Image: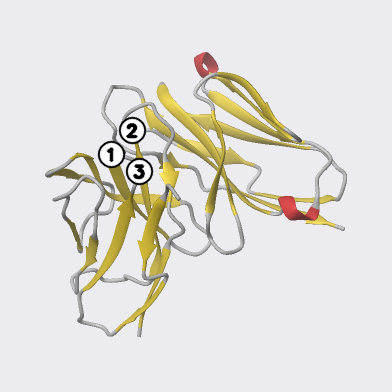
Amino acid sequence: GIQVEQSPPDLILQEGANSTLRCNFSDSVNNLQWFHQNPWGQLINLFYIPSGTKQNGRLSATTVATERYSLLYISSSQTTDSGVYFCAVEPGGGGADGLTFGKGTHLIIQP
Amino acid sequence: DGGITQSPKYLFRKEGQNVTLSCEQNLNHDAMYWYRQDPGQGLRLIYYSQIVNDFQKGDIAEGYSVSREKKESFPLTVTSAQKNPTAFYLCASSRGSGNTIYFGEGSWLTVV
């Protein structure tokens, strides 16, 4: 099956810093989503981005499908940005087979 | 409100007992999914259903069973055959392949 690798696995930053999270995947996809998991376990949709670039406030994401990677940018980090960020992909091929998740990046923003 | 509702949020089970987790969605989505998350890990797919009365095994289906008798409902039964059932379980739904997948708030299952 498709492989999803996220880097770095852990990231500790000071409030106000910028960060870049990376997601590499091993095959073509027809869905790529970024999630933020809060301390209560809820998965919050950040972006649906199988290709191209999107921005939402301090967050933006870029997926280069031909090179099989996606980047999530967080600017001017706040302590509330702490948590685990997951990249997940759905392989191309037509069936609604569900998302394959990476192991996540654990982000800690210190005040 | 539109969304995905999972219940119960917390559940304790004795070893050897089956337990059923509920998942209901009012988004009119065709596809529904069940995932398992272990501490410090990513999510793994248990079962998925692309349409009513049809479902397929995911990566870790052993010890689990599902049904899809109604479009809005996709219950998951954790059977006594599941060797290590303590985990966080998440239900999700989507309009189908290539569409955004939305998640419920999850159910914490602890075997005591």
Depth order, front residue of B103/A91: B103
Say which residue label 1 marks.
Answer: B31
Q: Earlier in the sequence, mark 2 or mark 1?
A: 1
In the rendered view, would you say A39 is above or below A10?
below
Name the one closer to the observer, A70 or B24. Answer: B24
Q: Are marks 1 and 3 on the same chain?
A: yes
Compare residues A40 and B42 and report the one nearer the observer: A40
Give me the C-alpha separation between circle 1 and circle 3.
5 Å
Q: Are marks 3 and 2 on the same chain?
A: yes
Q: Earlier in the sequence, mark 1 or mark 3?
A: 1
Q: Identify the image quadrant of the N terminus of chain A.
A: top left
Image height of B10 relative to A11, above or below: below
Chain of the residue under label 3: B
User: x, y (%) of residue A22?
Assistant: 63, 34
Residue at (43% x, 54% y) in the render: B104
Q: Check if mark 2's residue and mark 1's residue have beta carbons within 8 Å.
A: yes
Give residue A49's position: percent from left, percent from top: 53, 26
Write down the chain letter for disc 2. B
- How far apart are the two marked residues, 2 and 1, measured between alpha carbons? 6 Å
Q: Which mark is residue B95?
A: 2
Residue type at tag 3: Ser
Specify few, some or many for label 2: CA neighbours under 10 Å numbering under 14, 14-19, or 20 or more.
some
- Determine whether the residue tagged by mark 3 lies in a helix, strand or loop: strand
Residue B93 image label: 3
